[in-house]
Amino acid sequence: MSETNPAAAHGQADDLPLAGVRVLDLSRILAGPWCAQVLGDLGAEVVKVEHPERGDDTRDWGLRTGATNTSYFDAVNRNKTSVGIDLSTPEGLARVKAMARDADVLVENFKTGGADRLGLGYEALSAENPGLIYCSITGYGSGGPEATRPGYDLLVQGEAGLMALNGEAGQPPLKFGVAAVDLFTGQYAAQAVLAALYQRTRTGRGRRVELALFDCGLAITSYYGLEALVQGKDPPRYGNAHPSIVPYGVFEAADGPLVITVGNNAQFRRFCAAVLGRPELADDPRFATNLERSRNRAELLPQIRAELLRHRRADLLAKLRAEGIPAGEVLGLHAALTSERARAAGMVIGAGGEGGSAEASGGAARYVLAPPYRLDGRRMSVRRMPPALGESDMPGLTKKSII
C-alpha cells in the first residue's frame, strides 16, 4: 500500500483539471459529501461547513480513526478542509453567505425548503453570485408529492426495486453491501456539476442542479429495470450467476470459491476440454450454444460444479488463464485491499508510519482509498487527508488557494 504526506502530495496545480474551482460543501452524510469529494479529487478547493461541535453525522459512524474522525467520515471527505459554523446564528449565516459569494459550486442536501428558510437557497445566493453552480440533493425531488420526505439509501433500495433484484432466488430481498444509491447519486451529481461548469464557460451563468435519491435508485436498475417493464413482472434473481450467460458466476473449488466467466462458445469448448476434462459437454446439443446453455442451465451447472470441486483453486485458475478464459479468486475485503494488485495500483493511501495518523486515537491506523481517476497516465492524488472538525477556521472562502 502507498503512504503519502498530504502536505507534500505530488501533482502541481496545472495538472489538476479543477484547479482554482471553489466548492462550498454544506452537505452531510454520504451522497452530497461524495459529490464534493469527487470535485476535490479532480483538483477543486473544497471547504466543508460543519456544526462546530458535533460536525457531520458520520463523524459518529464506523470506526474511530482520530479525535473527530471515523472510517465512515474519512471515506467521503478526502481532499477537503473543514470549518465549524453554527447556521442557527446570524453570524454563522452571514459567514456562509459571504463564502457563497466567492464560490463556484455549492453542494447542499437540506430537507426541501430548509436552505430557503435560512436564506441559503438558490434564488437568494445566485442573485449575488450569478455564476454559482448550486447542487441540491433530495430524497424524492423538490417539486413532487413527497418533496418534504427525508430520503435514506436503504429506503430507496427497497422502493426502487433494487433489493428485489439482489440476492438468491427464493430468498428475502437483500440490500447491497454498500450504500449504492447514495454513492451513485453523489457520482451523478458530480457529473451534472461538471457539465454546468463547462456550460458556464460559454454563458457565464450558473445553474441549479438537482438530484433525487429515488430517481438515481431507479436509474441504476438499468437492464434489469427494462427487462421488468418488457416482461410486465419481476425478472428472476440469479444471485452470483448471470441471467443470460452460462457458465458465468461464482463456483466452488476444492479449497475455496472462484469466479469463472465463459463469454462465448469457443471459450466453452476450451473450458470443457482443457479445464473440466469433459469435452463431450460442448458436443451436447443442449449446451452447444449459449442460448441452449442458458435454457438448460439446470442440467449443465450441476455437472460443472461436480467437476470443479475435484480440483484446487490455484490449479483451476492456471488452466483457465492458459485457455484465455476470464477467472479470478473471490477474496475477502481485507485481502483484496492488501493484495499485490491493490498495492501496485496505488489504491490504498495511509497517513503516517504504517498508515497511522498522529491524531488517531488508541494508535488506530488511518487510511483512505485513492481517487480512481487517471489523467495522462497519472492518478489524481490525495492532497489532503479527511479533515479534523473545524481544522481550517477561515473567515471566508477566498480566491487565494487553500490547498
Image: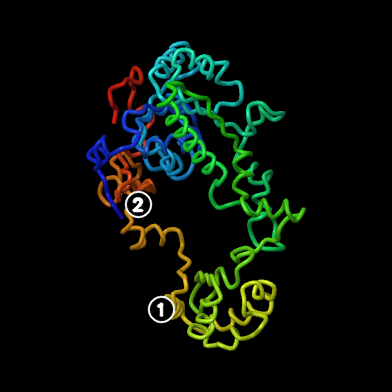
Determine if residue 364 is in view: no
Residue topped by disc 1: 322
Up/down of 173 relative to 357, above or below: below
Residue at mark 1 to residue at mark 2: CA–CA distance? 30 Å
Give residue 204's position: percent from left, percent from top. 42, 21
Q: Which residue is depicted at the point 26% across and 46% down?
A: 4
Q: Is residue 298 left or right of residue 271?
A: right
Q: Is residue 312 left or right of residue 149?
A: left
Q: Residue farthest to the left? A: 8
First reached walking from the N terminus: tag 1 or tag 2: 1
Q: Which residue is depicted at the point 43% across and 26% down?
A: 200
Which mark identifies residue 348? Answer: 2
Q: Which residue is depicted at the point 59% across and 80% down?
A: 304
**Would you call the spot at circle 2 few (<14 residues within 10 Å), some (14-19), or many (20 or more)?**
some
Give residue 231's position: percent from left, percent from top. 75, 56
Q: Amino acid at mark 2?
A: Val
Up/down of 249 relative to 4, above or below: below
Total residue callouts: 2
**Would you call the spot at circle 1 few (<14 residues within 10 Å), some (14-19), or many (20 or more)?**
few
Q: Amino acid at mark 1?
A: Ala
